[in-house]
Image (cartoon, rainbow, N blue to C red):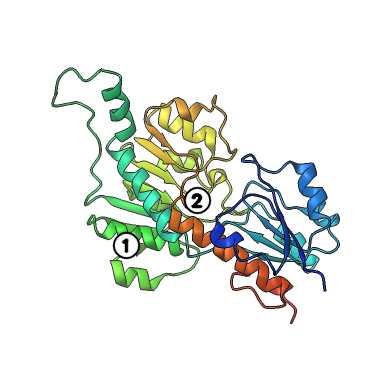
Amino acid sequence: MSLPRVYVTRRIQDAGLSLLPGRVAFEVWEKSAPVDRDVLLEKASKAEGLLCTLSDRIDEELFSRCPGLKVVSNYAVGFDNIDVEAATRRGILVTNTPDVLTNATADMAFTLMLASARRVVEANEFLRSGDWVTWHPDLLLGQDVSESVLGIVGMGKIGQAVARRAAGFSMKILFFNRSPRPEMERELAARQVSLDELLRESDFVSLHCPLSAETKGLIGERELRMMKKSSILINTSRGAVVDREALYRACSEQWIWGAGIDVFEKEPVPLDEPLLKLKNVTTTPHLGSATIKAREGMARKAAENLLAALEGRKPADLVNPQAWKK
């Protein structure tokens, strides 16, 4: 009996790829750039399984050309690159890779918080350019992180991990979440509040909500103007959660102190992106899960989910359980 055909849209870590030989017949896109759209459509049309990344658009057009497709395994915790409703209508399973990148992403959020507050990137450039000629009492003054107020938007696993790190800095924790999280209120003396109250009271606002129709543009001009002038916005969720033009104005016109941004609506970011020109905006190229341990865990989960679906087992990380049929 022939093995199920699988297309892998990017070379992931061997921790995942090493699970595939002998169980599926697979092909990998070997280039560093995302797979060409026409190649993806052609390869997917012959596949029973796809192992893809956030840079791949998996939509109705693709599904319509893939009569044998059974599973789309996303190498990410988010899945906004996939039309899950279209997949579900066709009985195609969609999976993701939660949990294994929680700590790495929480660490990145805290990295951006500290770097933005203490102007680390700006100070590094100041030093390397030779501008440091004397010490001065007002030189590159920043904001305190310890004992400040942290507002967390989205108290899922990553948001909770950030809150636990904040406790070590004696931060007061506010959070906004769609459902109650009484366990976090008890564990960390955190307080669940409305989004407006969180924005008004927080010194740092850290975004950890998934991208959806409800959260797209969640933070716009109205919300940014509610924040303190001394506050800092941190985004390690999805770029489209924040109105980019409003954020640029907020930082350039100093409605807020600054921002730490790991994600952008358009990635890779064009070099003419206005946010990149602002000294009070600290940026990283979507590195939230970029640790060896996290990426190996993601690769392993993505492969295991793919194999489970193709071997008739329910994947551990099924996004659309309604598509599962025993």
Quarter of the C terminus within the rendering:
bottom right
The answer, for residue 193, to whether it is visible in the render is no
* Depth check, front residue: 71 or 142: 71
The answer, for residue 133, to whether it is visible in the render is yes
Quarter where residue 309 is shown: bottom right
Residue beneath disc 1: 164
Where residue 212 sits in the image (x, y, percent)? 61, 54
Quarter where residue 227 is shown: top left
Left or right placement of residue 235 versus residue 81 in this view = left
The answer for how far apart the CA atoms under marks 2 and 1 are is: 18 Å
Left or right placement of residue 44 versus residue 318 in this view = right
Q: Amino acid at mark 1?
A: Arg
Q: Amino acid at mark 2?
A: Ser
Mark 2, Cα crowd under 10 Å, few <14 / some 14-19 / many 20+, is many
| The furthest residue to the front | 22
Query: Does label 2 or label 1 sit earlier along the sequence?
Result: 1
Name the residue: 73% across, 41% down.
Answer: 36
Asked if marks 2 and 1 touch (Cβ < 8 Å), the reply is no
Residue beneath disc 2: 237
Where residue 124 sits in the image (x, y, percent)? 30, 29
Instruction: Give SS at disc 1.
Output: helix
Left or right placement of residue 159 versus residue 231 in this view = right
Quarter of the N terminus within the rendering:
bottom right
